[in-house]
Amino acid sequence: MSRPDIRVENHGSVVLLRPATPAGRAWLEANCDRSGYQPFGGGTLLCEPRYVAVIVAGARGAGLEVR
């Protein structure tokens, strides 16, 4: 199994999207409007669970591994 580019951590009322590779970080920075998501250090985004499916689908559509 390959290393994921983005790791998804579900903490109930919030979800952390952590870039695990440079490609994952670049994709999050280019595709997630920082005004709509809360930065959480190290390129990690903190967001509401309702946004995660769309973000994950977009990243996977771009060829990234997301887990």
Image: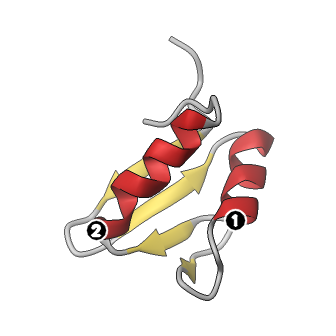
Residue 19 vs residue 16: left or right? right
Neighbor class of circle 2 (other Cα within 10 Å; few <14, some 14-19, many 20+) is few
Mark linked to residue 42: 1
Q: Position of residue 9 (x, y in %)?
A: 37, 54
Q: Is residue 13 left or right of residue 6?
A: left
| Figure check: 30 above or below 63 | below
Q: For the point 64% across and 76% down, which residue is it?
A: 33
Q: Could you tell me how far apart the alpha carbons at marks 1 and 2 are, in whole angstroms? A: 22 Å
Q: Nearer the viewer, residue 59 or 66?
A: 59
Q: How many marks?
A: 2
Q: In the image, what residue occupies the spot 50% across and 58% down?
A: 17
Badge 1: residue crowd in 10 Å (few <14, some 14–19, many ≥20) = few
Quadrant of res 35: bottom right
Q: Secondary structure at mark 2?
A: helix
In front of the other: 26 or 10: 26
- Answer above or below: position of 46 versus 23: below
63 up-or-down from 38: above or below: above
Q: Which residue corresponds to the image point at 42% horizontal and 49% vertical from the top-left? A: 8
Q: Amino acid at mark 2?
A: Arg
Q: Closer to the observer: label 1 or label 2?
A: 2
- Give the farthest residue toward the bottom: 35
Scheme of colours in the image: secondary structure
Q: Which residue is mark 2?
A: 50
Q: Which residue of the protein is positioned furthest toward the left in this rendering?
A: 12
Query: Is 48 on the left or on the right of 17, as rendered?
Result: left
Residue at position x 75%, y 61% from top? 30
Q: Which mark is residue 32?
A: none
Closer to the chain start, of discs 1 and 2, is 1
Q: Quadrant location of residue 44? A: bottom right
Q: Position of residue 46 (x, y in %)?
A: 47, 73
Image quarter (top left, top right, bottom left or bottom right) of the C terminus: top left
Amino acid type, label 1: Gly
